[in-house]
Amino acid sequence: MNHRNEWLHINSGKVLIAGPCSAESAEQMLETAKGIAEHFPNNILRAGSWKPRTRPGNFEGSGVDGLRWLKDAGSQTGMRTITEVATPQHVEAALSIGIDMFWVGARTTGNPFLVQELAESLRGIDIPVFVKNPLHPDLHLWIGGLERFQRMGQKKLVAIHRGFHAYENSGYRNVPRWQLVHALKSLHPELPVICDISHIAGNTTHLFSIAQQAYDLDLEGLMIETHVNPKSALSDPDQQVSPVELHAIVSNLTQRVRSFEETAVMNQVGELRNKIDHVDERLLELLVQRISLIEELGNLKRENNVSVLQLERWKSIIDNCMDMARTHGLNQEFVRNIFLQIHDEAIRLQSNMLRDFSEKDRKI
Ligand code: PEP
Ligand code: MN
């Protein structure tokens, strides 16, 4: 376990935050908490108490009462508690009731004014803060949210990947963007990142596979909305699971180890990695060759005053590549993206060559 993250008490190697979307009543909180604690006594119990919906007039949370129900349920079952805070008033109320941790919701992370106010309201208070990604895929806004708390002295910070809003119908309520998580991990290797699989899925069908993917990527834990009676939930009824379903999901997940351990396997891995390094070298040599051909062609375009972008030629390149990708059983989207990048670079290089020429012209 990472020494710096000991406060998370990751006994089984992973953090689990489970509990309802919203605190609805003392009974709902306690029954849900009991069901969770039976299998996951180290769980962190979650519940939202301020739930502004897309349009006003629906259930909008139970405010301070909800916080009391959450705290009581946590105390009776021995679980630490976490709630969403979006304003300094929320922080004040939650601190006075003794909530143990806070999370910052996706809509709040998107608003640096609010995050700054929240961070300032926590100055000098040592409490874990979990920051969800903003709705749109802006890694720096997410990191910026975490930094605002860090600058106010918070040391116990965790990022939550809860998926990103998508206009197109993706099959998810919020599309996961694992590349962004990977980028976040590369920039901040010491920062724990957990995955809120419920707000990604939006239903219960794909919860398991999203959770397994989070484990496969070595994320530090999961947030899973859990309700004693999901169908009757006052918010997010479609995506919440019962405590029994929560147990079925978590107990079926496979945890991966960080690195290879057996010498024989390590040797095999070493050999394969050498071969991969060699292929990478060849790929780069081929790119050098391709760029020099692009430049020769650029010269001809310049000398003959021909435009850089040749749509027919580009179409035939991409059609050929797609044919070859199909023949070799490669992911076509992957191949298309690589060639889009190569083509963009070709256009950039050749445009610069033409620009050089016209600049010289202007000087004459
Ligand atoms: C929630 O966790 O209940 C919630 C509202 O999350 P998000 O901010 O990710 O939408
Ligand atoms: Mn919810």
Image: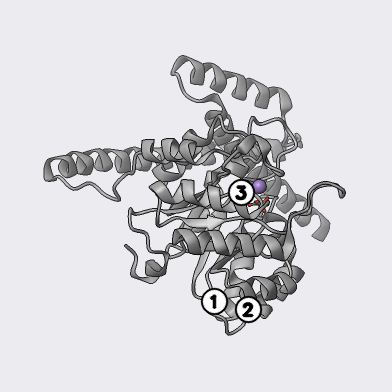
The residue at which mark 3 appears reads as 28
Residue drawn at point x = 40 percent, y = 57 percent: 42
Q: Secondary structure at mark 3?
A: helix
Query: Camera-side residue: 240 or 128?
Result: 240
Seen at 64% across and 66% down, the residue is: 145
**Between 362 and 110, the one nearer to me in the picture:** 110
Amino acid type at circle 1 is Gln
Asked if disc 1 and disc 3 are in contact, CB closer than 8 Å, the reply is: no
Per the model, the C-alpha gap separating discs 3 and 2 is 30 Å
Residue 176 visible in this rendered orientation of the protein: no
Using a 10 Å C-alpha cutoff, classify the residue at mark 1 as few (fewer than 14 neighbours), some (14 to 19) or many (20 or more): many
Q: How many marks?
A: 3
Residue density around tag 3, few if under 14, some if 14–19, many if 20 or more, within 10 Å: some
- Quadrant (top left, top right, bottom left, bottom right) of the C terminus: bottom right
Residue drawn at x 73%, y 56% as measured from the top left: 107
Q: In what element is the residue under mark 1? A: loop
**Extreme residue toward the bottom, this view:** 124
Give the residue number, with chain letter if any, for mark 2.
122
Choose mark 3 or mark 2, whichever is in front.
Answer: 3
Q: Is residue 314 visible?
A: yes
Disc number placed over residue 235 in the picture, else none: none
Residue position for label 1:
154
Q: Quadrant of residue 46?
A: bottom right
Q: Quadrant of the N terminus?
A: bottom left
Give amino acid for label 3: Gln
Which residue is more in the foreground, 39 or 167?
Answer: 39
- Tell me, yes or no, whether the two marked residues, 1 and 2, touch with CB atoms within 8 Å: yes
Measured as percent of width and height from the top left, residue 260 is found at 23, 46
C-alpha span from label 1 to label 2: 8 Å
